Amino acid sequence: MTPFLDALRQRLGEAGLLIGGDLSAYESDWRKRYPGRALAVARPASTAEVAAVLRLCQEHRVPVVPQGGNTGLVGGSTPDDSGGQLVLSLARMKRVRSIDAANASLTAEAGCVLADVQAAAAGAGLLFPLSLAAEGSCTLGGNLATNAGGTQVLRYGNARELCLGLEVVTAAGEVWQGLSGLRKDNTGYDLRDLFIGSEGTLGIITAATMKLYPQPRDRLTALAACASLDDAVALLGLARARAGDALTGFEVMSQASLALLARELPQLQQPLGAAAWTVLLELSDAESVEHARAAFEGLLGAAIEGGCVQDAAIAQSLQQALAFWHLRESIPLAQAQAGLNIKHDISLPVSAVSSFVAEMDAALAAYLPGIAVINFGHLGDGNLHYNVQAPAGVAPAEFLAAHEAAINAKVYDAVQRRGGSISAEHGIGRLKREELGRRKDPVALGLMRAIKKALDPQGLLNPGRLL
Ligand code: FAD
């Protein structure tokens, strides 16, 4: 054992350090696109232990890859194949430290699984609204490190908007105690916002104080069939105008996405017939169940009358509402089953979404006949998962090797022309690092590099990711 690993073992004990054996769960990402080899896996159980690990890494110049639930989709949380990077798993730091109901806030450790944070808030009669399909395994620390979005951004904002304060261990092993529950604090640079979305490249998030909200009296979910994306955008406008803040979810699924679901996960029932676009809407109502239902029926009735919706189904029970959401949230799984694809997690002004899709669908069909576009996402936020799959009979790996660069160039050029972003919510990691270097404003990139240098002068925190 090297002096570094020896010192780590002494500090963390047997349970806190995994060396050798089967480390594959820590070494490969959810999509199995970035398999690597770890020097070891450190599993600290406290902030003090995280700080000790970072001090040792600094002393021995060992690079560190922070890891939460390892559900990230951009290759940020797994080691490279050098065998020299230490994986720092936060999985043992999963305590909800406190809930302050009067302040509507909750403080939890970084390794807390998102569903457990939601459950703790619900246990106190409050709502923690961050919600995404990976919530059964992703962690609060990972959510903040990637500034996760998900299905409730429309109403509550992304992870950044939900965060009040952070506790962070710096590259030098110091602890920044910033767990403030304050909604107002103008005392200089906003360090919290600096660490959020930094993908483990500036410091290790060990705990966070998050905002909570009142639980809605009722939540209603519906599916609506639209003949075009323009109609779906019109429905969004109508829903916003009529429901305002009560509109808490607005997701779209293309016909090809639902056909893929039917093929890969045939056990999932699809209540509406095939439509060019199926919208999932959610209304959360503070008044009463009756009020919620009347509002929803009024909205969908007006949409059908106005012509932007052809058919609709309102969930009649909580179980059916969950089944509607399950359809939407199962699309990534169906895609994973179908094989590797070229993912584009993009955002655009909502007004530009339809023209983007029309241009890109035509451009890709002309580029490679038979190509399959699986397009779905959070239309309410202008966020599409515009994913491209190989034509039938072409092996996914071959398809990616031959076409990924060309297809990315087409998609990202069209996004950039419309003032969009190449990463709406998944982050940059290794997948989009080169693309970011080419496309981000050079002044912004220079400032980001200067910040990285100031906070991590040895470049040991998640090297090769983001920048
Ligand atoms: P990891 O994957 O472990 O890590 C992600 C990044 O954060 C890595 O760079 C890692 O080094 C860093 N990191 C992790 N923990 C810490 C820490 N404590 N301190 C510093 N850095 C850290 N994302 C969305 O935004 N919206 C969605 O709707 C969404 N849907 C998804 C659906 C599926 C089926 C899957 C598999 C993923 C989805 N994701 C989505 C992506 C992913 O779940 C999120 O990015 C999530 O926030 C990652 O959390 P994690 O704990 O798994 O982090």
Image (cartoon, rainbow, N blue to C red):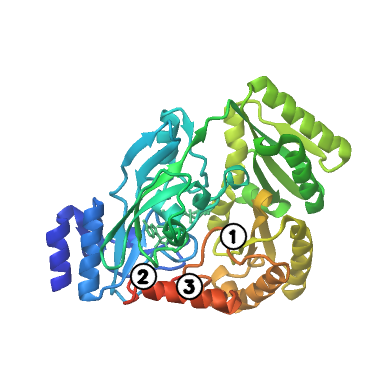
> Mark 3, residues whose alpha carbon is within 10 Å: few (<14), some, or many (≥20)?
some
Quadrant for ligand 1 reads bottom left
**What residue would you read off at disc 3?**
448
Measure the alpha-carbon separation of dots 3 and 1: 18 Å
Residue in the image at 57% along x and 48% along y? 157
Q: Is residue 220 left or right of residue 184?
A: right
Type of residue at label 1?
Ala
Type of residue at label 3?
Met
* Residue nearest the observer in this picture, 115 or 33: 115
Q: Is residue 339 left or right of residue 49?
A: right
* Residue nearest the observer in this picture, 412 or 121: 121
**What residue would you read off at disc 2?**
455
Quadrant into which the N terminus falls: bottom left
Question: Tags 2 and 3 in contact by the CB under 8 Å rule?
Answer: no
Type of residue at label 2?
Leu
- Of badges 1 and 2, the one in the foreground is 2
Residue 467: percent from the left, percent from the top? 46, 74
Measure the alpha-carbon separation of dots 1 and 2: 25 Å
**What residue would you read off at disc 1?**
424
